[in-house]
Amino acid sequence: MDAFSFGRLKSCCLSGDPLVIENGTFSWGDDAPTLKNINLNVKKGGLVAVVGTVGSGKSSLLSAFLGEMDKVSGRVNTNVSLVDRQAMSQFGFV
């Protein structure tokens, strides 16, 4: 890990809230924005349920947090770890 990455990690981890999106707009590649004007702040230790119909953007919201979508505008701060259930099952944890 280089000094720049360590500095970003340190500032991210000390910022307080582990999940923050402020005025976020996100798209999949060159497509029109999929998520618009997203504001979400999850406090440390918080529990959040994202509920909606098929195609309403639940998976896209998670993808936006993980940096898998293109951020058109806004601010995203993430300080989380995610382990895929399929990867865990390969090692007998699920």
Image: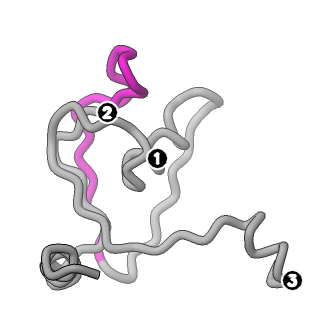
Question: Could you say whether the residue bearing mark 2 is in a helix, strand or loop?
Answer: strand
Mark positioned earlier in the residue sequence (1 or 3): 1
| Mark number displayed over residue 91 | none
Q: Position of residue 56 (x, y in %)?
A: 53, 29
Front residue of this view, candidates 47 and 3: 3
First to last magenta residue range: 27-43
Task: Look at the numbered discs 1 and 3 and tell me whether their residues touch, using CB distance below 8 Å.
Answer: no
Q: Which image quarter is the C terminus in?
A: bottom right
- Residue at point 29% right, 81% down? 1
> Residue type at mark 1?
Ser
Front residue of this view, candidates 2 and 63: 2
Question: Could you say whether the residue bearing mark 3 is in a helix, strand or loop?
Answer: loop
The mark tally for this picture is 3
- Give the labeled residue for mark 2: 26
Q: In this view, does 10 lie above or below 51?
A: below
Mark positioned earlier in the residue sequence (2 or 1): 2
> Residue type at mark 3?
Gly
- Give the labeled residue for mark 3: 92
- Give the labeled residue for mark 1: 63
Q: Where is residue 21 in the image (x, y as percent from the top left)?
A: 24, 52
